[in-house]
Image (spheres, rainbow, N blue to C red):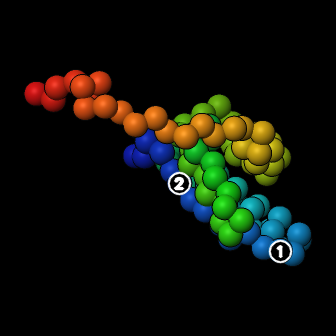
C-alpha cells in the first residue's frame, strides 16, 4: 500500500538552456525515485506551474513514470490555457456546515 497520496516537488529555472534541462531532468528523476520507493507504477501530473523562477509539479499515482518530454507537453498546454478569474462564492451558495 502506498504511503503517499500525492508528491510535489520543484526546481529552479535557469537562463542557461543546458542547465535548465539538467534541473528539470533532476526534478523528473527525483519524482520517479520517490514514486518507485512508494510502490507506485507511475505518475499522473495533477498540478503544474512555472513562474519564470521555478517549475513546480504535483503527481498522484498513474500509469507510467514521469518523463521530461511529458513535462514539456505540460508546459506547452499551460501556455495555451486561458485562466478565468475566480467568481466570488456567495455565502448563500456555500450551504450549511453541520
- Disc 1: which residue: 15
- Say which element carries label 2: strand
The answer to whether 83 appears left or right of 98 in the picture is right
Q: Residues within 10 Å of mark 1 (few under 14, many from 20)?
A: few
Q: Which of the pair 97/65 is nearer the observer?
A: 97
Mark 1, mark 2: which one is toward the viewer? 1
The residue identified by callout 2 is 8
Residue 39 left/right relative to 93: right
Q: Where is residue 2 shown, x and y percent of the image?
A: 43, 41
The residue positioned 83% from the left and 74% from the top of the image is: 15
Residue 75 pos. (x, y %): 76, 48
From the viewer's perspective, tell me whether residue 22 is left or right of residue 45.
right
**Along the viewing direction, whichever of 75 and 41 lies nearer the viewer:** 75
Residue for point 46% across, 35% down: 87
Examine the rendering and report whether any part of residue 40 can be seen. no
Quadrant in the picture for residue 21: bottom right
| Residue 12 seen in the figure | yes
Residue sitting nearer the eye, 30 or 38: 30
Q: Residues within 10 Å of mark 2 (few under 14, many from 20)?
A: some
Q: Quadrant of residue 53?
A: bottom right
As measured in the structure, the alpha-carbon distance from the residue carrying label 1 to the one carrying label 2 is 23 Å
Q: Nearer the viewer, residue 38 or 48?
A: 48
At which x and y percent is residue 74? 74, 43
> At 57% across and 59% down in the image, what residue appears?
9
Residue at the limit of the structure toward the left, as seen here: 98
Q: Secondary structure at mark 1?
A: loop
Can you give x and y, in whole percent of width and height, for residue 5 in the image?
43, 42
Residue in view at x 76 percent, y 61 percent: 25
Say which label, 1 or 2, has the lower sequence index.
2
Tell me, for residue 41, which label it has, or none.
Answer: none
Viewport quadrant of the C terminus = top left
Amino acid at each position: 500500500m502506498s504511503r503517499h497520496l500525492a508528491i510535489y516537488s520543484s526546481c529552479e529555472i535557469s537562463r542557461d538552456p543546458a542547465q535548465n534541462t539538467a534541473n528539470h531532468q533532476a526534478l523528473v528523476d527525483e519524482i520517479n525515485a520517490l514514486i518507485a520507493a512508494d510502490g507506485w507504477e507511475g505518475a499522473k501530473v495533477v498540478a503544474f506551474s512555472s513562474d519564470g523562477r521555478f517549475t513546480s509539479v504535483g503527481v498522484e499515482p498513474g500509469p507510467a513514470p514521469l518523463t521530461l518530454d511529458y513535462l514539456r507537453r505540460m508546459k506547452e498546454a499551460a501556455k495555451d490555457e486561458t485562466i478565468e478569474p475566480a467568481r466570488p462564492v456567495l455565502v448563500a451558495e456555500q450551504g450549511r456546515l453541520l
